[in-house]
């Protein structure tokens, strides 16, 4: 097994790494870069807890090899608040609407929905449900999450 | 955990040479949504993984005469976004849109969905109904194989160990034709299909069925064409009685098994009900609600 050197660009910061190629982007984010906001749920692409944005598109970080993500812009939950620590408006709305229960699905859900809002600033409930379909919430908090997204969409009128 | 080397071949020639050198221990990585899961669970243990996700000859969506050529590494999200696919192969676009989740569609590829050879693969019935062929590249050059012959069993294909699927060639849907896809699953997203089906139909000026293709998934060892049902429709009027007869034939000729998702007899009932609905949608008879993606 040959290790590979590469640069990962995460939340605008470059990280030079030397990695075994079998390691998933998820494991490297958590264990090498300490970005543990990205959660490890099923490790098989079912639950969406590890959702990150690759060049703006939501993907399951467990199904991407870290060596495949070189040269792409990676956004994790740590990168969505502003540099002064101000939460993203969608994160504020999650709190406001009680959309965070245990919190395990929250980082992935927020990233999926930020991607949606960039593409579709005023989504319908059906569009929100569709964008959220790959993020499982076992606390049954979907209604609050959808309400939170709609409130952000409404306030940006 | 299985350790492997990672190679990103710059050309198809490099890929073939790499596969040859790896002998039986190389794996082709396109989207990785199946391969990584298989590696982690020990089902696959490649020594070298060849990443074709950026390999130009496997990345195109090209209209060529009466054919649409899709590279094996074209992602489901790219199929969904392609105006050419929506126009020339609308049932495939519909299947891609209903597959799994947005995260998976942003990675999963058409070639991967075919080569994995799940009997429930959603992209396969639309391709099978459209008589798609596959371009396979090996040391001795390319061969073009009909999809129906490529799939030989659950997880099994006729792809050689040092061969690679590079392109999927789909006869374009003509102006008078219609096609449709239906996925029946436990929920709308992230669900393996209990059954899936696709159809295309060409009805002549005389109102009679000129040509028809009906493909059923998850009801046999591979996705299959409902040939008896098709035969019963060609040259006949798409009347409610004829469509019902064809749907009954489709249910008769499928060979479903019982598994965690449904019983065999339940699948047979679904095939009859949804084939009927599919045919009504294709023939625009108004005899069914527009085909849904869920039961």
Image: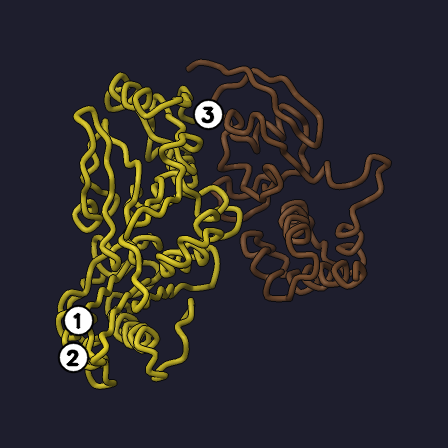
Chain colours: A brown, B yellow
Q: Chain of mark 2?
A: B
User: SS at mark 3?
Assistant: loop
Q: Are marks 2 and 1 on the same chain?
A: yes
Q: Is residue B124 left or right of residue A140?
A: left
In the rendered view of the protein, which quadrant contains the C terminus of chain B? bottom left
Q: Nearer the viewer, residue B96 or B235?
A: B235
At horizontal 67% and vertical 37% (from top left) the residue drawn is A76
Q: Nearer the viewer, mark 2 or mark 1?
A: 2
Which quadrant would residue B116 be assigned to in this image? top left
In the rendered view of the protein, which quadrant contains the N terminus of chain B? top left
For the question of whether residue A21 can be seen, the reply is yes
User: SS at mark 2?
Assistant: loop
CA gap between label 3 and label 1 equals 47 Å
Q: Where does label 2 land, which residue?
A: B236
How crowded is the residue under tag 1: few (<14 C-alpha within 10 Å), some, or many (20+)? many
Q: Nearer the viewer, mark 3 or mark 2?
A: 2
Q: Is residue B78 left or right of residue B252?
A: right
Q: Are marks 3 and 1 on the same chain?
A: no
Say above or below: A100 vs A10. below
Which quadrant would residue B203 be assigned to in this image? bottom left
At horizontal 19% and vertical 51% (from top left) the residue drawn is B148
How crowded is the residue under tag 2: few (<14 C-alpha within 10 Å), some, or many (20+)? some
Rendered image: mark on residue A22: 3
Q: Where does label 1 land, which residue?
A: B229
Q: Position of residue B118 (x, y in %)?
A: 30, 49
Q: Chain of mark 3?
A: A
Q: Position of residue B124 (x, y in %)?
A: 30, 53
Rendered image: mark on residue A106: none
User: SS at mark 1?
Assistant: helix
């Amino acid at each position: 097994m040959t290790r590979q050197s590469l640069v990962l660009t995460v939340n605008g910061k470059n990280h030079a790494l030397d990695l075994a190629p079998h390691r998933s982007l998820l494991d490297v984010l958590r264990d090498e870069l300490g970005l543990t906001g990205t959660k490890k749920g099923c490790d098989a692409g079912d639950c969406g807890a590890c959702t990150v944005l690759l060049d703006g598109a939501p993907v399951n970080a467990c199904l991407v090899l870290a060596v495949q993500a070189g040269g792409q812009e990676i956004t994790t939950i740590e990168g969505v608040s502003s540099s002064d620590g101000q939460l993203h408006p969608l994160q504020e709305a999650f709190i406001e609407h009680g959309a965070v229960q245990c919190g395990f699905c929250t980082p992935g859900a927020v990233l999926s929905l930020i991607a949606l809002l960039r593409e579709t600033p005023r989504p319908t409930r059906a569009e929100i449900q569709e964008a959220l379909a790959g993020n499982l919430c076992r606390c049954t908090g979907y209604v609050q999450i959808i309400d939170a997204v709609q409130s952000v969409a409404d306030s940006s009128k | 955990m299985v350790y492997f080397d990672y190679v990103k071949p710059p050309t198809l020639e490099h890929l073939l040479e790499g596969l040859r050198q790896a002998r039986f221990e190389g794996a082709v990585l396109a989207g990785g949504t199946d391969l990584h899961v298989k590696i982690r669970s020990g089902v696959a243990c490649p020594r070298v993984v060849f990443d074709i996700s950026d390999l130009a000859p496997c990345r195109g969506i090209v209209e060529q005469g009466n054919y649409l050529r899709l590279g094996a590494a074209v992602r489901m999200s790219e199929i969904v976004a392609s105006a050419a696919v929506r126009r020339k192969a609308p049932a495939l676009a519909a299947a891609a849109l209903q597959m799994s989740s947005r995260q998976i569609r942003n990675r999963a590829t058409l070639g991967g969905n075919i080569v994995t050879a799940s009997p429930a693969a959603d992209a396969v019935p639309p391709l099978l109904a459209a008589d798609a062929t596959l371009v396979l590249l090996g040391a001795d050059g390319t061969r073009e194989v009909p999809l129906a012959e490529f799939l030989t069993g659950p997880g099994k294909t006729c792809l050689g160990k040092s061969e690679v699927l590079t392109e999927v060639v789909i006869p374009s849907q003509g102006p008078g034709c219609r096609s449709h896809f239906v996925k029946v699953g436990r929920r709308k997203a992230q669900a393996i299909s209990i059954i899936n089906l696709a159809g295309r139909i060409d009805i002549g000026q005389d109102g009679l069925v000129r040509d028809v293709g009906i493909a059923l998934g998850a009801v046999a060892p591979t996705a299959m064409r409902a040939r008896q049902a098709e035969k019963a429709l060609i040259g006949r009027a798409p009347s409610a009685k004829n469509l019902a007869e064809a749907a009954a034939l489709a249910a008769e000729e499928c060979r479903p098994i019982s598994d965690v998702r449904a019983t065999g007899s339940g699948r047979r009932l679904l095939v009859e009900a949804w084939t009927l609905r599919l045919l009504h949608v294709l023939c625009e008879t108004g005899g069914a609600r527009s085909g849904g993606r869920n039961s």
